[in-house]
């Protein structure tokens, strides 16, 4: 009985607090109108999110991996929260505000923070500003909660770390009732350094994507394709720039390798970063289930450093040198030279939902060749200045997905990674482990809850 009395008292207290928002002269229609207005505002706010908990097993302890990051030294298994997203969206007619954070055992980080508004006349032009997905290709914007593999391909993780960037873009797409709604163009200007750091130079990157999407055979067949272009770069910190050419050896013979360009004007000039991409998506529904084929191909020039081909988020630094003046050692930062590589890569997905069941099978192939102008057995040759950053990788992924219900999804996925090998390993080379394929395959068990 005491419990019921407490509940009633709490309810009355709440009613008293709420009633204080209205004056005694307010009529019932006025009060109802205010309540309806508050409810309408609440409907504009949408909260969504998902959590991915997983356990992973690697072939070898402490491997470098693109399946969620490198394994800690001495460890070949790990349990963790891969993504813990909470997204807040407020939509009002032709405008929207979005904030998304990611909370894992490693900390809390910002994922999205942007505003968006559409022209009220023809509802075709939309402006987006803030931190959001780069408008390049298809895989970047395809949500991690929907993606059939645990991670994006090695190519995209290398070129676009973090997927997002800070900038602004214009989207041109006729409204849904238009016969031309299947055409979409996105173009914008970005820092080029990623979502969580400030820009380190005055140069900005231009990114664009043109896509088409149509359905046929009474919605049973859907085809989408697009093309992308990226033009940007970053400020070089030294005079030394390296490009692949024929390099003369001490015995007057030639090898393929990096040749130094020490033009005085290189320092503080822009090192050009340019990509071109094509993407396609095909979805077909039959009595056997829904089959999806997706593919993407990117080629271009990637400026980075001698040790890595990953796009830098800060001025690349080689190491810290201590200059000794008498008894005082002063730290001095030595910037990295720029290495320009012509690259290519892509991925192919095959996804099939088995008839009307909750089961889904996945096969994926992706590859990334960071330096197309040099053969594998030319990598590591003495005086060529080539190394691990020039090695090509391919990954075959096989997976099974079970949709427990509308919120819970189970995934088992195996990544078989194969690296290019080179036979020219001279004494003192850092490529000794690349004379054979590394044991760096990864098995992932994942549970996802989405709301």
Image: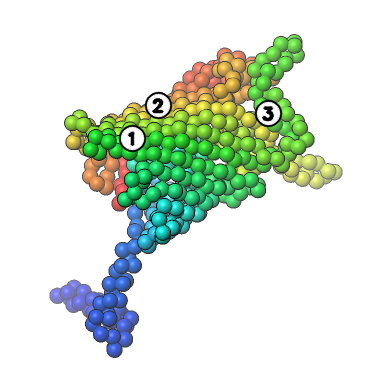
Q: How many labels does the image show?
A: 3
Label 3 residue SS: strand
Give coordinates of residue 421: x percent, y percent: 53, 18
Using the image, tell me which numbered label, if any, was put on residue 158. Answer: none
Label 1 residue SS: strand
**Is residue 73 visible to us here?**
no
Which residue is found at the position 53% from the left and 42% from the top?
A: 207
Residues 426 and 20: in front is 20
Give coordinates of residue 120: x percent, y percent: 41, 60
Give coordinates of residue 451: x percent, y percent: 30, 51
**Where, by quadrant of the figure, is residue 98 drawn?**
bottom left
Compared across the picture, whether 269 is left or right of 395 comes to: right
Which residue is found at the position 75% from the left and 11% from the top?
A: 252
Residues 415 and 139: in front is 139
The extreme left residue here reads 1
Q: Mark 1 points at which residue?
A: 223
Could you tell me how far apart the alpha carbons at marks 2 and 1 are, in whole angstroms?
20 Å
Quick one: label 2 or label 1, which is nearer the N terminus?
A: 1
Compared across the picture, whether 283 is left or right of 104 comes to: left
Q: Mark 3 points at which residue?
A: 242
Q: Mark 2 points at which residue?
A: 365
Compared across the picture, whether 334 is left or right of 128 comes to: right
């Amino acid at each position: 009985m005491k419990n019921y009395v407490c509940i009633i008292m709490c309810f009355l207290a709440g009613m008293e607090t709420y009633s204080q928002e209205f004056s005694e002269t307010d009529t019932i229609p006025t009060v109802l109108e205010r309540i309806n207005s508050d409810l309408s505002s609440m409907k504009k706010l949408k909260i969504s999110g998902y959590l991915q908990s997983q356990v992973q097993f690697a072939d070898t302890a402490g491997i470098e991996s693109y399946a969620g990051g490198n394994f800690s030294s001495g460890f070949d298994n790990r349990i963790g929260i891969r993504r813990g997203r909470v997204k807040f969206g407020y939509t009002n007619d032709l405008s929207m505000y979005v904030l998304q954070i990611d909370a894992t055992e490693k900390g809390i980080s910002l994922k999205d923070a942007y505003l968006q508004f559409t022209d009220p006349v023809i509802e075709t032009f939309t402006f987006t500003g803030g931190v959001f997905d780069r408008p390049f290709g298809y895989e970047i914007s395809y949500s991690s909660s929907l993606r059939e593999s645990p991670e994006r391909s090695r190519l995209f993780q290398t070129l676009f770390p973090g997927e997002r960037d800070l900038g602004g873009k214009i989207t041109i797409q006729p409204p849904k009732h238009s016969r031309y709604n299947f055409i979409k163009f996105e173009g914008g200007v970005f820092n080029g350094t990623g979502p969580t750091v400030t820009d380190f130079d005055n140069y900005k990157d231009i990114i664009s994507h043109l896509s088409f999407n149509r359905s046929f055979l009474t919605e049973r067949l859907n085809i989408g394709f697009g093309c992308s272009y990226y033009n940007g770069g970053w400020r070089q910190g030294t005079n030394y720039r390296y490009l692949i050419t024929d390099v003369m050896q001490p015995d007057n013979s030639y090898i393929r390798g990096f040749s130094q360009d020490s033009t005085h004007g290189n320092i503080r000039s822009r090192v050009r970063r340019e990509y071109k991409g094509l993407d396609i998506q095909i979805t077909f529904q039959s009595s056997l289930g829904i089959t999806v084929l997706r593919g993407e191909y990117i080629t271009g020039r990637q400026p980075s450093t001698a040790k890595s081909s990953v796009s830098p988020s800060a001025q690349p630094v080689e190491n810290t040198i201590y200059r000794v003046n008498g008894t005082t050692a002063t730290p001095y930062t030595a910037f990295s030279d720029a290495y320009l590589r012509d690259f290519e890569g892509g991925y192919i997905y095959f996804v099939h939902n088995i008839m009307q069941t909750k089961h889904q099978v996945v096969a994926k192939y992706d590859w990334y060749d960071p330096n197309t102008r040099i053969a594998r057995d030319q990598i590591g040759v003495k005086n060529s200045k080539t190394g691990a950053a020039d090695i090509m990788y391919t990954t075959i992924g096989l997976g099974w997905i079970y949709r427990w219900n509308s919120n819970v999804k189970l995934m088992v996925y195996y990544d078989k990674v194969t690296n290019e090998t080179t036979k020219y390993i001279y004494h003192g080379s850092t490529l000794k482990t690349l004379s054979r394929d590394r044991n760096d395959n990864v098995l992932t068990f994942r549970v996802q809850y989405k709301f």
